[in-house]
Image (spheres, helix red, strand yellow):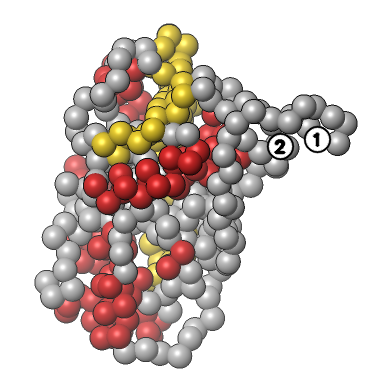
Amino acid sequence: MVHNGRSESPGDDGSASARTPARTPRRASRSFDDLVAEGAAVPTDGWDFSWFEGRAAEARPSWGYARAMAGRLARADAVLDVQTGGGEVLAEALTHAAAPTTAPSTPDPTAVPSTPAPTAAPSTPGPTAPRTPSTPAAPAAPALVVATEGWGPNVRRATRLLGPLGVAVVASPEDAPLPFADEAFDLVVSRHPVRPHWDEIARVLRPGGRYFAQHVGPASVFELVEFFLGPQPDAVRSARHPDRERADAETAGLDVVELRAERLRMEFHDIGAVVHFLRKVVWMVPGFTVTEYEERLRALHARIESDGPFVAHSTRHLFDARKP
């Protein structure tokens, strides 16, 4: 079972630069054993990718998902975040939605930084101050916000983060039916779901409601996957294709209003970052352990030491679908 949130890359939606990752100056070489031990010791729960700073980077999609979500939250009444992970992206979006002024559209701070950029502390959404010439009124927060998550450590993490924001976190396995009544929500959001359950999404949306989500695309980070596993069959490389997901959404009765896709550069600057990534994103190299893949890890370490960062590419697509 996927158990650690949905990002299958160091991050693409947060405090990393939206530009192609800048190359980090080479640091003094550290031993393979030290780097691997460090990468193997880092906890993997939640979506806090600050550990990767200076060690891995990823360019983010141009649409800035968390801030784009914030605009939807500000206009919604009842919201469901499916597979919230540690709740970081939803918390960031709620912060922006409740902000007293509307900031320009900029990247969302919830991912691995290529340059330091701390995540803003969440503020509790609620009634806003009376409008004055110097204090524009904030958008109203949704009356109801609920999040689901299937992995126990992330349920606890999300509850701690989102509870003070008035969000109810419901423990629900990724493959189970959503534990909500028909037509309960006017907005369903999700960042990097394991897979979208289109029939369930359509069921819980009200007529006129929207599904607004960022999905992982096909052959994402496959340069790294195939370094460890060898060439993958076409059926594996084409999984998560946006055209197929569009067809599935339409079969479930949703109208796809917008579908955008981007391919984004990633860099791994040391083997410790690779180890932590493969531990955190468990479906990339199934059954990954340092012992099982030590030979390939040593080969990749030598390559990074001699040639510089290992470059891969993530794929992302943005879904905006409406229930008629």
Image-based side of 253 in relation to 298, left or right: right
Does the residue at mark 1 contact the one at mark 2 (Cβ under 8 Å)?
yes
Q: Residues within 10 Å of mark 2 (few under 14, many from 20)?
A: some
Rendered view: 302 above or below 227: below
Rendered residue at 54%/81% (across/down): 25
Image-based side of 113 in relation to 174, left or right: right
Rendered residue at 22%/52% (across/down): 283
Which disc is residue 244 wearing? none
Image coords of residue 101 (percent x, y): 73, 37
Image-based side of 138 in relation to 78, left or right: right
Amino acid type, callout 1: Thr
Amino acid type, callout 2: Pro
Rendered residue at 51%/56% (across/down): 59
**Circle 2 — which element?**
loop
Q: Can residue 300 be seen in this view?
A: no
Which disc is residue 100 wearing? 2
Image coords of residue 275 (percent x, y): 28, 70
Q: Can residue 118 be seen in this view?
A: yes
Image-based side of 93 in relation to 167, left or right: right
Question: Where is mark 1, residue-wise?
Answer: 135
Which mark sits nearer the N-terminus, 1 or 2? 2
